[in-house]
């Protein structure tokens, strides 16, 4: 059974930092594109950052230079370091894993989501 469990969210003041963690079980994270998405109230879920199995990273323009995605294969964990947080970063953040397997087809998993609130 595959599980993605997010942690590290919470309330932070504007300009502050948080580090989100996504602990994976049942998959090998190095074989997946691991990503972070977010969804604010009344808005669509959007990609924040992802990292391919080859460690190529991709960021939304709104977070470039402020957020960093990383992966620890030995711990089966993906991180999102968020610096210089803004109120508009407030959202539920979701961990995502995707892999296209020639045998199994597209494998797609989501975490349960974690709240990040940026407010003074």
Image (cartoon, grey):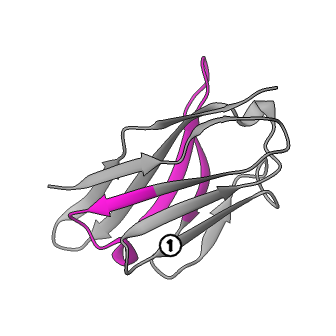
Q: Position of residue 95 (x, y in %)?
A: 45, 50
Residue, far top: 42
Q: Where, by quadrant of the figure, is residue 31 drawn? A: bottom left
Pick whichever, 83 or 48, lies toward us.
83
Q: Is residue 89 above or below residue 68?
A: above
Query: Which residue is rendered at x = 35% and y = 46% of the image?
Result: 110
- Neighbor class of circle 1 (other Cα within 10 Å; few <14, some 14-19, many 20+) is some
Badge 1 marks a residue whose secondary structure is: strand
Q: Position of residue 26 (x, y in %)?
A: 20, 64
Q: Position of residue 108 (x, y in %)?
A: 31, 53
Pick whichever, 2 or 43, lies toward us.
2
Q: Is residue 38 above or below residue 60?
A: above
Q: Is residue 108 above or below residue 113?
A: below
Residue 57 relative to residue 100: left or right: right
Pick whichever, 25 or 9, lies toward us.
9
Q: Where, by quadrant of the figure, is residue 67 drawn? A: bottom right
Pick whichever, 14 or 89, lies toward us.
14
Q: Position of residue 18 (x, y in %)?
A: 66, 50
Residue 40 relative to residue 21: left or right: right
Q: Where, by quadrant of the figure, is residue 44 drawn? A: top right
Query: Which residue is rendered at x = 85% and y = 44% of the image?
Result: 15
Residue 47: say if magenta: yes
Q: Count up the numbered dots.
A: 1
Position of the C terminus by quadrant: top right
Query: Which residue is rendered at x = 40% and y = 79% of the image?
Result: 73
- Residue stretch rendered in magenta on the structure: 22-50
Residue position marked by numbered label 1 in the rendering: 71
Q: Is residue 8 above or below residue 112?
A: below
Query: Which residue is rendered at x = 46% and y = 76% of the image?
Result: 72
Position of the N terminus by quadrant: bottom left
Residue 34: say if magenta: yes
């Amino acid at each position: 059974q595959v599980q993605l469990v997010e942690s590290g969210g919470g309330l932070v003041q504007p300009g502050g930092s948080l580090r989100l963690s996504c602990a994976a079980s049942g998959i090998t994270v190095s074989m997946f594109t691991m990503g972070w998405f977010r969804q604010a109230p009344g808005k669509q879920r959007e990609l924040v950052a992802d990292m391919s199995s080859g460690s190529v990273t991709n960021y939304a323009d709104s977070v470039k230079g402020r957020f960093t995605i990383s992966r620890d294969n030995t711990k089966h964990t993906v991180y999102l370091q968020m610096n210089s947080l803004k109120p508009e970063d407030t959202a539920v953040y979701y961990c995502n894993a995707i892999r296209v397997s020639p045998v199994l087809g597209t494998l797609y998993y989501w975490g349960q989501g974690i709240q990040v609130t940026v407010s003074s």
